[in-house]
Amino acid sequence: MSENLVATARRLARAGTGKPRQSDLRRAVSTAYYAVFHAVARDAADLLVGAGAASKRPEWYQVYRALDHGPAKVACIGVRTGGGPLALVAEAFVDLQIARQGADYDPAFRVDGSDAISHCDRAARALSTLSQVPRSDRRAFAVALLFRNRR
């Protein structure tokens, strides 16, 4: 689904002939973020519950739906300072979420076509990077995003 969301975002960013409408560009920015959000949610559920037939189980759905935008953003801020490939994913998650909040909620938010495409490219790179990270590191990332660290 996430790759399809990036493709949808790209179509929106290039919609129509001539200058794209702000509504299409804003929707493209929002959709680029959701591509990463859903990829991380699916990966977490697959890693913590199981993929394939396990994705039909209620606990898979529960893990998928447990990813919360605010706490995940806070966790990503911590992950991105650690370096490595997951830092790229975490940084994209944070930056795309900030852009998405502007696109979805700020009436003064403006974006041009090249910036919208840049957000799409960033989402695509994050998806590609996430798929190349070792399972154990992705599982640790999922746990960091889903569970509060009590120290």
Image (spheres, rainbow, N blue to C red):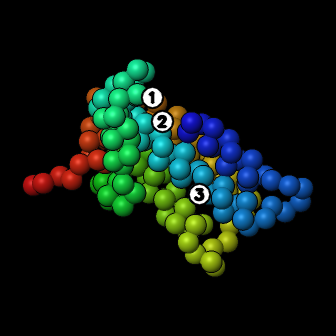
| Label 1 to label 3: alpha-carbon separation | 24 Å
* Residue 69 in the image, given as x and y percentages of width and height: 40, 57
Q: Is residue 113 left or right of residue 32?
A: right
Q: Secondary structure at mark 3?
A: helix
- 83 vs 17: above or below: above
- 96 vs 53: above or below: below
Q: Residue furthest bottom?
A: 108
Residue shown at 59% from the left, 57% from the top: 30
The residue lying toward the viewer, choosing from 23 and 151, is 23
Residue shown at 73% from the left, 67% from the top: 22
Q: What residue does disc 2 label?
A: 129
| Label 2 to label 3: alpha-carbon separation | 20 Å
| Label 2 to label 1: alpha-carbon separation | 5 Å
Q: Nearer the viewer, mark 1 or mark 3?
A: 3
The quadrant of the image that shows the N terminus is top right
The residue lying toward the viewer, choosing from 81 and 31, is 31
Q: What residue does disc 3 label?
A: 30
* Residue 16 in the image, given as x and y percentages of width and height: 86, 55
Residue shown at 60% from the left, 52% from the top: 31
Q: Nearer the viewer, mark 2 or mark 3?
A: 3
Q: Which mark is residue 55?
A: none
> Do callouts 2 and 3 mark residues in contact (Cβ within 8 Å)?
no
Label 3 sits on what residue type? Ser
Label 2 sits on what residue type? Thr
Q: Which mark is residue 132?
A: 1
> Mark 2 or 3 closer to N-term?
3
> Do callouts 2 and 1 mark residues in contact (Cβ within 8 Å)?
yes
* Residue 6 in the image, given as x and y percentages of width and height: 63, 43
Give neighbour class at mark 3: few <14, some 14-19, many 20+ (Cα, 10 Å). Answer: many
